[in-house]
Image (spheres, rainbow, N blue to C red):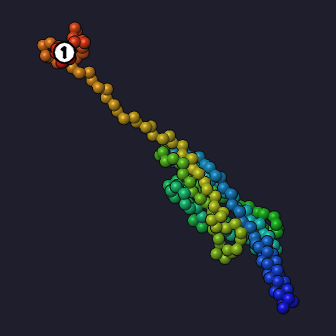
Amino acid sequence: MTRRLLCLLTALAAMFALTAGDALATPELSLITDSVVYEPPTAQIGNVRGEVAYTRAAASDPVSYTANIRTMGGSATEFDDYSPWIYVPITLTAPTVGVPVTEKFNITVFGDDVFEGDETFDVLLAPNGSMPFANGLGQSSARTVTILDVEDAPPVTPPVTTPPSPPPCQSGSGIPGPGTCPGNSGHGGGGHGPH
Ligand SMILES: [Ca+2]
């Protein structure tokens, strides 16, 4: 019984060791991008710079790996504020195990003359259908880009307030007129109220 248990534990330990070894052999992908970009001038374009890195962890990992770039989410509008990347493939070739290789890319942002406030979108590495095993894929790779709006907020117009016009002067003759009736201040023509 004890020997059987020992065998079972040994087998389990071997399984965990194998799992750990496989995990270490998984190729690694990573993504970085500019986190902030100023909106370009009206009718001009600008770029968000990005870079994908690929590292072969073992000789059995593919020399070339193709990942896909996907933009999504955020408050910015595709085709209006930036040119979306919808599963655009990027192929990285790593001849040497353990030595990362990188590929750069640019995402276009569009300028306008509209006050929109700062807006964002995410860039992430989507799995490639034929090689979905690399670490670093998916939502965990997402990088948020903020497009800083360059237009000023429209001025806040204070509500129009009309100062109250002075009451028309009531002269002794009873004819309304502007201003203060000479000699009519303080005691205006009417008698005093009851005490
Ligand atoms: Ca703008």
Q: Residue furthest right?
A: 3
> Nearest the camera: 191 or 31?
191
Expressed as whole percent of the image width and height from the top left, the position of residue 77 reads: 50, 56
Residue 171 appearing in the image: no
The answer to whether any part of residue 103 appears in the image is yes
Where does label 1 land, which residue?
A: 192
Dividing the image into 4 quarters, which one contains the C terminus?
top left
Is residue 60 shown left or right of residue 106?
Answer: right
Q: Is residue 105 above or below residue 171?
A: below
55 on left or right of 188:
right
**Eyeballing the image, is 122 above or below 91?**
above
Q: Position of residue 98 (x, y in %)?
A: 82, 66
Residue at (16%, 14%) from the top-left corner?
191
Q: For the residue marked with disc 1, what is the amino acid?
A: His
Position above or below: 162 against 117:
above
Q: Residue at x 54, y 46 (%)?
A: 149
Identified at 73% across, 62% down, the residue is 53
Q: Which quadrant of the structure image shows residue 107?
A: bottom right
Mark 1 Cα shell of 10 Å, populated few (<14), some (14-19), many (≥20): few
Please name the residue shown 65% across and 64% down the image. 140
